[in-house]
Image (cartoon, rainbow, N blue to C red):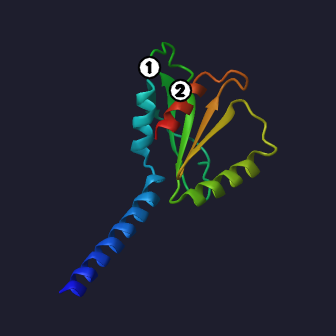
Amino acid sequence: MKSKLGIIVLICMIALVGCSKVKNVKENEYSVQDVINAFESQNLKLIPYGMAGTIPTLNKVIPEMSSVEDVATVDHSDPELVYFYIFNTEAGRKSGIKEFNKEMKNAKFTTYPFLYEKGNILTIYWAKSKEKPLLNEQIKSAIEKL
């Protein structure tokens, strides 16, 4: 009887340890909805934005593209853009960043990319100003809240 109880306890311990490892893997996996919620918590408004021409894929991932503005913004005629790349893994995101940096090495910019990384998500904010990106602090706070 004691050996059966011992085996049951051992099986439960193994199951708990296994479940905790799965949870740790999932903690660094985010969805587009997670990002949207984080942005909204910083009073940022995201509006889906269509893209004409070539879609900028990274590591075979097509981004979710949105215009982004502070909810207090009055002029909506010239929005800034944000791309959300949702990779399958954190390693996929890291590979995507390498690809992005390679592609941007000799690029001439009219808007400036600011990259934010967390888990499997790469967010690229395309600001109009390199020195004073309008929404940088709010976006940084949103990504940290994930």
Can residue 117 be seen in this snapshot?
Answer: yes
Residue 75, relative to residue 114: is it above or below? above
Q: Amino acid at mark 2?
A: Gln
Q: Position of residue 144 (x, y in %)?
A: 52, 37
Please tell me which residue is depicted at 27% across the width and 75% down the height of the picture. 9
Q: Position of residue 118 (x, y in %)?
A: 55, 46
Earlier along the polypeptide chain: callout 2 or callout 1? Answer: 1
Q: Is residue 111 left or right of residue 45?
A: right
Query: Nearest the camera: 53 or 5?
Result: 5
Cβ–Cβ under 8 Å for marks 2 and 1: no
Q: Which residue is mark 1?
A: 71
Please state which of the two labelled residues, at mark 2 or mark 1, is closer to the viewer.
2
Q: Position of residue 111 (x, y in %)?
A: 69, 30
Please tell me which residue is depicted at 22% across the width and 80% down the height of the picture. 5
Give SS at disc 2. helix
Give SS at disc 1. loop
Q: Amino acid at mark 1?
A: Val
| Furthest residue toward top | 74
**Mark linked to residue 14:** none
The residues bearing labels 2 and 1 have C-alpha atoms spaced at a distance of: 12 Å
Q: Which residue is mark 2?
A: 138
Q: Quadrant of the N terminus?
A: bottom left
Instruction: Classify 10 Å Cα crowding around label 1: few (below 14), some (14-19), many (20 and above).
Output: few
